[in-house]
Amino acid sequence: MKGTLEYLMSNNPSAQYLRESYIFKIIPMLNPDGVINGNHRCSLSGEDLNRQWQNPNPDLHPTIYHAKGLLQYLAAIKRLPLVYCDYHGHSRKKNVFMYGCSIKETMWHTNVNAASCDLMEDPGYRALPKILSQTAPAFCMGSCSFVVEKSKESTARVVVWREIGVQRSYTMESTLCGCDQGKYKGLQIGTRELEEMGAKFCVGLLRLKRMASPLEYNLPSSLLDIENELIESSCKVTR
């Protein structure tokens, strides 16, 4: 998130173009009380806040309650977000990857397995992860999943997709360990690599807009050069 915020607030012409192209609604931390007391997932009420999105309690889960209310308001005034994404840490898997939502939202009520679900999936769900896999060294497309499981139906990305109607609704998971592919293979991920990922997410939104509106969106050649330089540049890795 620090990398995302610093990039968006920079004087980089691409960042300026992003600010002119999108309205960003940013909540830097949804579990401040839990995190400041050392928790990874749970708030001080002892609950995993990312399992409370279906029916958040305003007293027990105030950040979730009001974040969902903001999204419901945007939907009500016909300003549905193009992308919803929350940033998480992952304690077991390596690399950075995304969980998204496939078109088979009730697959646990059918005999359809995950493989056939992927075959019927709208390719729009995969556009942003594919862009990130091409531009961000730590991101791994092979680690992404777009299957909606019953155990995840109360998570943010599923509720925002199903109830709010945001097609591109994701959780971006960042390893707490390291990478097993790309230029960071075999290395412990650090704050610089995480900040780089946050900046690359912004560049991904820039490319996504160009893909979504090719006739309306003509990026000046100077900005294209800057974008390409950002994609080709990377943090120096220190052991």
Image: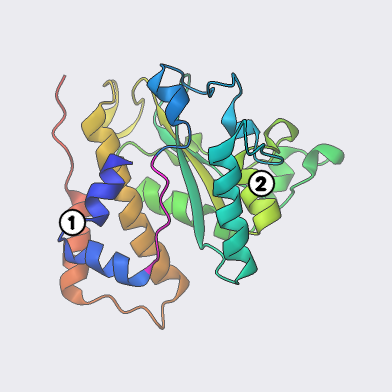
In the picture as drawn, the residue positioned furthest to the front comes out as 59
Magenta span dominant secondary structure: loop
Image height check: is 32 above or below 201? above
Please name the residue that numbered disc 1 is placed on.
10
For the residue marked with disc 1, what is the amino acid?
Answer: Ser
Q: Residue at x 15, y 72 (%)?
A: 222
* Number of residues whose C-alpha sits closer than 10 Å to that of mark 1, classed few (under 14), some (14–19) or many (20 or more): few
Q: Quadrant of the N terminus?
A: top left
Image height check: is 238 above or below 112? above
Residue interval drawn in magenta:
22-28
Please give the label number shown on residue 159.
2
Residue 109 vs residue 96: left or right?
Answer: right
For the residue marked with disc 2, what is the amino acid?
Answer: Val
Residue 150 lies in the magenta stretch: no
Residue 231 vs residue 86: left or right?
Answer: left
Q: Residue at x 65, y 34 (%)?
A: 52
Q: Mark 2 or mark 1, which is nearer the start of the sequence?
A: 1
Residue 25 lies in the magenta stretch: yes
Q: Secondary structure at mark 2?
A: helix
Q: Residue at x 70, y 53 (%)?
A: 163
Estimate the x, y position of residue 44 in percent, counting from the top left. 53, 21
Closer to us: 43 or 210:
43
Q: Is residue 47 visible?
A: yes
Residue 57, quarter of the rendered image: top right
* Number of residues whose C-alpha sits closer than 10 Å to that of mark 2, classed few (under 14), some (14–19) or many (20 or more): many
